[in-house]
Image: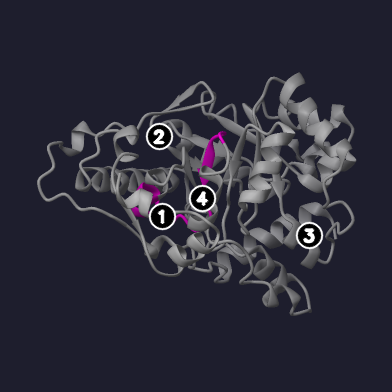
Amino acid sequence: MSTEKRKEEHIKICLEKDVDMHATGFDDVFLSHQALPDITYDDVDLTTDFFGKKLKAPILIEAMTGGTKIAEKINKNLAWAAEQAGIAMGLGSQRAALEDPSLESTYQVRDVAPNIFLIGNIGFAQLKKYEKEKITRVIDMVDADALAVHLNILQELVQPEGDQQSLHITQDTIEKIRFVAKELSKPVIAKEAGCGISREAAIKLEKTGMSAIDVAGFGGTSWPLVESYRSDTSIGKTFAGWGIPTVVSLVECCKSVKMPVIASGGVRSGIDMIKSLALGALLCGAALPFLRPATESKEKVLEKIEQFIQELKIAMVLVNAKTIDDLRRKPVLITGRTREVLELRGFDVRKYARR
């Protein structure tokens, strides 16, 4: 099956099937409510610096699609709304356009979003195979500000067309990552695809020269489950519950590396966002909540973004945090199974509660 056809199926399944796992760990995280805040809603300042570009809110529209004609409308609507809201956006895997240049237009959004922080996208398996010049094409074709390298080992293993032979890291791969980071002078972001990034993986990624980590933890869209709807086997369903919950992955990464960490994987509200930011995330990313609005209109996408921002600002008032820096000094309680897992992994969650 062509890459273009596969992209169409992914969009259709995400719109029509329940592929959300609802197991992020956010329910185990609590912030301390302040009944007497000394700030108002209008005092809250969400501006965030992301690799030199100022965002009006710490929100990233996560990579979703591209490489099929329907994706052109979706990406244009997402990008227009991101431009209006002053937030960042990631594109879906650009492999399809590298295979068929006629599909490049399905990723190109600068005509409607000249100022957003835009992230290009290539898979880890393709990164290993492609020549350096082809990797630079990923950025050039869309005028991207950064490159995401997505790590989707489980999806590749259960996908009928998956590449099961190019998923291990080699010295050549490390050198390619370093080339992209150095020669292009662009940030390179390691992005999982719904299974989370562990402490061990984060440390390894930092050593390769990656600039940031997007945890994409377990609890949001399950790509093994998506793939199960595309095939006749049940293997994808067997692994639908596999991965590191988003909160666990976020804490492990934030406490193990110095580079910026993006929280994603089941982020579904401004409350999820404030919890992520309080735990150390620089940005909060979401994809599925924006997909259906993007199939309707650019205005619908903007409405959804504004809802997230409003929820986040209300939550900031409720914890008496005027800025994101203020928020990171507020106490956070991590309880339940999430606390148990983090403590078993050697992380002292009491430090968050005593800030």
At x 29%, y 31%, the residue is: 45
Tell which of 350 and 281 is nearer to you: 350
Position of residue 25 measured from the top left corner of the image (x, y, whole percent) = 45, 63
Marks 1, 4: nearer the viewer: 1
Which numbered disc covers residue 349?
1
Which numbered disc covers residue 223?
none
Please state if 10 lies on the left or on the right of 62 as rendered. right
> How far apart are the alpha carbons under marks 2 and 3?
34 Å
At x 72%, y 26%, the residue is: 181
Q: Which residue is mark 2?
A: 85
Q: Do residues under tags 2 and 3 come within 8 Å of each other at their CB atoms?
A: no
Which numbered disc covers residue 250?
4
Mark toward the start of the polypeptide (3 vs 1): 3
Q: How is the image coloured?
A: one colour
Determine the secondary structure under disc 4.
helix
Marks 2, 4: nearer the viewer: 4
Marks 3, 1: nearer the viewer: 1
> How far apart are the alpha carbons under marks 3 and 1?
34 Å
Mark toward the start of the polypeptide (2 vs 4): 2
Disc 1 residue type (three-letter): Val
> How far apart are the alpha carbons under marks 4 and 3?
23 Å
Disc 3 residue type (three-letter): Glu
Give the residues in magenta: 258-275
Mark toward the start of the polypeptide (2 vs 3): 2
Mark 3 crowdedness (10 Å alpha carbons): few <14, some 14-19, many ≥20: many
Tell me, yes or no, whether the highlighted magenta stretch contains residue 262: yes
Mark toward the start of the polypeptide (2 vs 1): 2
Please state if 195 lies on the left or on the right of 265 as rendered. right
At x 67%, y 60%, the residue is: 10
Position of residue 297 measured from the top left corner of the image (x, y, whole percent) = 47, 47
Q: Which residue is mark 3?
A: 156
